[in-house]
Image: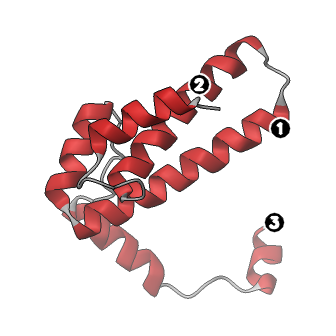
């Protein structure tokens, strides 16, 4: 859990206006600091499954906020990712030759149960 001083420093660094405490940028930065603290805690306390569950929830929340920010404000997203050193997810793109193989597989009718029994 972050103490008030650390949280205030994070808010000061990432705020978008004077009284900002809830913008996606600030929320992502706070969640990143909490993730970092929980990760360090779990390195020494390997069997603390309650904290592990909390870590997974925080990472998921941060991922959703990052996705939202990327959709709404690409420039701000790039700045946050760069300043927090967050790894980006790989783009899920396929090569053109893979698409034809997949479309051919999807057009074939599935084998019926009787055909599968005959093959066995």
Q: Which mark is residue 50?
A: 1
Identity of the residue drawn at 34% across and 55% down: 20
Q: Nearer the viewer, residue 103 or 115?
A: 103
Q: Earlier in the sequence, mark 1 or mark 3?
A: 1
Q: Position of residue 11 (x, y in %)?
A: 37, 41
Query: How many numbered marks does the figure carry?
Result: 3
**Badge 3: how crowded within 10 Å, few (<14), some, or many (20+)?**
few
Judge depth for marks 2 and 3 and give the one in front: 2
Distance from Cα at disc 2 to Cα at disc 3: 54 Å
The figure's colour scheme reads secondary structure
Q: Position of residue 23 (x, y in %)?
A: 36, 59
Quarter of the image holding residue 52?
top right
Gap in Å between the C-alphas at discs 2 and 1?
Answer: 14 Å
| Mark earlier in primary sequence (2, 1) | 2
- Residue 41 lies left or right of residue 97; in this view the side is right
Indicate the secondary structure of the residue bearing disc 2: helix
Question: Separation of disc 1 and disc 3 at Cα?
Answer: 47 Å
In front here: 104 or 27?
A: 27
Residue at 29% from the left image edge and 43% from the top image edge: 14
In the image, what residue occupies the spot 41% across and 53% down? Answer: 21
Q: Earlier in the sequence, mark 2 or mark 3?
A: 2
Asked if residue 21 is positioned above or below residue 47 in the image, the reply reads: below
| Label 2 neighbour load within 10 Å: few <14, some 14-19, many 20+ | some
Q: Residue furthest front?
A: 18
Picture quarter containing residue 3?
top right
Residue 22 place in picture, x, y as percent: 42, 58
Mark sitting on residue 37: 2
Residue for badge 3: 120
Instruction: State whether residue 41 is above or below residue 49.
Output: above
- Where does the image place residue 111, in percent across and percent down from the top left? 66, 82
Q: Secondary structure at mark 1?
A: helix
């Amino acid at each position: 859990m972050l103490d008030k001083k650390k949280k205030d420093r994070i808010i000061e660094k990432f705020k978008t206006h004077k009284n900002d405490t809830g913008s996606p940028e600030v929320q992502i930065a706070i969640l990143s600091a909490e993730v970092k603290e929980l990760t360090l805690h779990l390195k020494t306390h390997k069997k603390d499954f309650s904290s592990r569950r909390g870590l997974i929830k925080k990472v998921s929340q941060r991922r959703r906020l990052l996705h939202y920010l990327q959709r709404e404000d690409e420039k701000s997203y790039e700045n946050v990712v760069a300043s927090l050193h967050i790894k980006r997810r790989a783009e899920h793109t396929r090569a053109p030759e893979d698409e034809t193989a997949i479309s051919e597989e999807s057009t074939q009718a599935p084998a019926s149960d009787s055909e599968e029994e005959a093959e066995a």
